[in-house]
Image: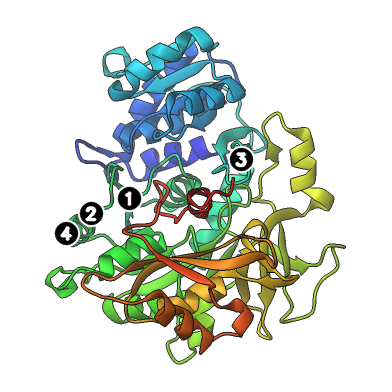
Amino acid sequence: MTIGDLLVRNAHKFPEKTAVVTEDASFTFRALNERVNSLAGLLISRGLEKGDRIGVVVHNGHRFMEIYFAAAKTGGIFCPYNNHLRSEELKDLIQYSTPKFLFFDEDFGSMIEGLKPELAVTHYIGDYEGLLAPFAEPAVKVTEEDVLSIIFTAGTTGKPKGAMRTHRHLMSDAIASAIDLRVEYDEKVLITFPMYHVAAEDNIVRHSFLPNTIYIKKEGGFNPEEVLAYISKEKITRCQFVPTMIHSLLQIPDVKKFDLSSLRLILYAGSPMPAELLRQALEVFPCGFAQLYGQTESGPFTTVLKPEDHDLTKPARLASSGKAALNYEIRIVDESDKDVAVGEVGEIIGKSEAMTIGYWQMPEATAEKLRGGWLRTGDLGRFDEEGFIYIVERKNDMIISGGVNIYPREVEEVLYRHPAVSEVSVIGIPDEHWGEVVKAAVVLKPGASAEPAELIDFCGKNLAGYKKPKSVDFWEELPKSPQGKILKKEIRKHYGEK
């Protein structure tokens, strides 16, 4: 089955069921399928051939899903671009992926117009409502092995790379995640994060597979009260947040004024969840929690900490990322690719039908990422005796001080336990004697106060002396990506490290 087949099936079996709800429209599966067919007909009439890239610079909304399914049905390759990029950054991505078609929302029009002389795009399409006409199911032969999407990495270690995802890859991910997360047929699923992110594609396919109703909020700032009000009003059953979003929700003085009884599950992913923050969330929200770990290249459904594993009587496990997903094999290896012993730290590598087939037009980077048939995550972790996986740190974030490895997350977990600390990020900064020393960038809770020496002393009481920060700086807010992830890269830049 291909991803386009999912929508056809839903239109036939569940024609009047609501497929998607946005701030300005809603469509049943029958109506969505008809709109997708019309859009597919438009693409075919303008010369789309199988394998052509379809670039997308749009806001969260039904247009994103329509273009996605039109690509799925026509054999096009869907390329969603980060709509927060500046002109030069966007130009680089478009030139890298060479789309024949470029869809864009009106407010990106002037930027696109300025880039046209430097792009090889054949067709630019803004508002396509007046261009749609009835069209039968496309007759293009699409197979499970065809590439459906190129999702671009965040570029934390250089320019973004395009991870190719096939129909087979996406179906494997959808089936495994639906089973592991026990997704039902009557779910109302809320998407609040930018849809160009890999997690959005993951949600679209998973909840088209079953099928469910997807509610889409336009991106552009996370308003916690507005989100909780929306969950209450629409009776949302599932939503996905990053830890900083959950932190924002917990800052609302009276969460109980919102009726959240419909919520069955909150997924969290994107960055490690401090155990103390998770403990607070489990006590406040009347639903299950599940953590997903993965990458653009891996699925992103790679490991899962299931609701039943969120046990407050086993607090150490709350720092775990769970066990391998149903369709994944996970190993933790040393630099020679030999499995490390239980409890020892090594690189997390994985193998699955769901992982990327490689980077677009980057054979050398692909060969390195998928060396020996195993996907190299670049993340350091360890197994415990029961097979739970603990993410220790990204290789590039590990601090080496005096030849000793220090994992920032371990220090962050301690600082989050201090009653005055709201958010924290720990990095290594250059030092002539030690090579690197530990620095903590801290945001205090509203009305709270603390001194650097107090926080350093707090760490010293809970960590070995060499792990505690040598300095603490207070920030009004920490830099974050559009998905809400704290950007260590930007913090390092602030302190002069490139």
Foreground tag (1 vs 3) = 1
Q: Position of residue 403 (x, y in %)?
A: 76, 70
The residue beneath circle 4 is 229
Pointers 2 and 4 in contact (C-beta within 8 Å):
no
Q: Position of residue 209 (x, y in %)?
A: 46, 50
Q: Secondary structure at mark 4?
A: helix
Gap between marks 2 and 1 measured at Cα: 10 Å
The mark lying in front, picked from 2 and 4, is: 2
- Disc 3 marks a residue whose amino acid type is Arg
Residue bearing the label numbered 3: 165
- Mark number, residue 461: none
* Sooner in the amino-acid sequence: mark 2 or mark 4: 2
Compared with 408, 34 (above or below) is: above
The kind of residue tagged 2 is Asn
Which of discs 3 and 2 lies nearer the camera? The answer is 2
User: Callout 4: few (<14), some (14-19), or many (20+) C-alpha neighbours within 10 Å?
Assistant: some
- Which mark sits nearer the N-terminus, 2 or 1? 1
* Badge 4 amino acid: Ala
**Quadrant location, the N terminus:** top right
Task: Name the amino acid type tagged 1.
Answer: Thr
Residue 10, picture quadrant: top left
- Do the residues under discs 2 and 1 have CB atoms within 8 angstroms? no
Which residue matches tag 1? 192
**Residue tagged by mark 2?**
223
- Element under label 1? loop
Query: Residue visible at 46% across and 16% down?
Result: 43
Neighbours of disc 1 within 10 Å: few (<14), some (14-19), many (20+):
many
Q: Position of residue 277 (x, y in %)?
A: 38, 75
**Residue at the image position 47 percent from the left and 32 percent from the top:** 81
Left/right placement of residue 71 relative to residue 276 reads: right
